[in-house]
Amino acid sequence: MSIKNLIRQSLPLLLIMGVAQMFTGGILSSMATMFRNTPGLIVIVPAIIGLRGNINAALGSRLSYAAHLGIIDIKKVFGKETKENVKASIVLSVACASLLGFLSWLTSIGLGYHVNVLVLIAVTLIAGTSAGLILAFITVGIVIVAFRKGLDPDNITGPFLTTVGDIVTVICLFGAVMIVGGA
């Protein structure tokens, strides 16, 4: 692929996603009271956003690779290979979210904040798992759309998933805090 094609495919999406990140910042700023009421939540934000990016970027890469090699048929995308990759990403989401809750509690204690470990684990488990489910299906969808439009999914999935992943994860974090009542 030439540099010109790479820029043509990626630059417009990067610009749109950059503007969309402002939406995520707006959601985070509306959560300021929640962060004050449960200080351990602020420790979760960068970690859970990074977690989503790592898991879903890997899923996007695996699906793109499999589609390039013909392992996944874009017309019948939900075959065994895709299902196994999605299951693996969801299992990773649940396991890592649970561990993240515990580690954020330890970090909060280390910083001198007293927070309920169960609240942090519940928030990360609900937010991480729900964001993981939503983003797994978005990942499959973006790979399919990119291939059908004649674009290289490797150029599209990264920027798209990092931004959409941030937005979905912050919304799920907000919802999880509301459900758990940690704020």
Image: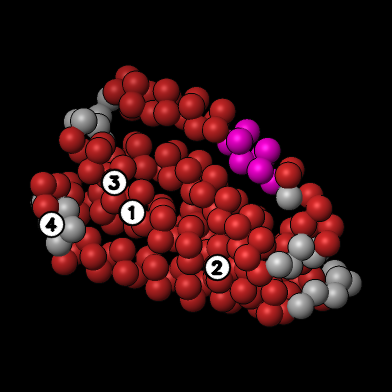
Q: Nearer the viewer, mark 4 or mark 3?
A: 3
Residue drawn at x 85%, y 75% is 114
Q: Position of residue 123 (x, y in %)?
A: 63, 68
Calculate the distance from the C-alpha at mark 1 to the C-alpha at mark 2.
17 Å
- Which secondary structure, mark 1? helix
Q: Residue flagged by tag 2: what amino acid is it?
A: Ile
Residue 126's disc is 2
Residue 112 higher or lower than 6, as above or below = below
Label 4 Cα crowd, 10 Å radius (few <14 / some 14-19 / many 20+): some
On the image, which quarter does residue 167 sit in?
A: top right
Q: Are marks 3 and 1 in contact (CB under 8 Å)?
A: yes
Residue drawn at x 69%, y 46% is 28
Whether residue 49 can be seen here: no
Label 2 Cα crowd, 10 Å radius (few <14 / some 14-19 / many 20+): many
Q: Which residue is mark 3?
A: 141
| Range drawn in magenta | 21-28
Q: Earlier in the sequence, mark 4 or mark 2?
A: 4
Residue drawn at x 58%, y 76% is 99
On the image, which quarter does residue 8 sit in?
A: top left
Whether residue 25 can be seen here: yes
Q: Are marks 4 and 2 in contact (CB under 8 Å)?
A: no
Q: Which residue is mark 1?
A: 137
Residue 71's disc is 4
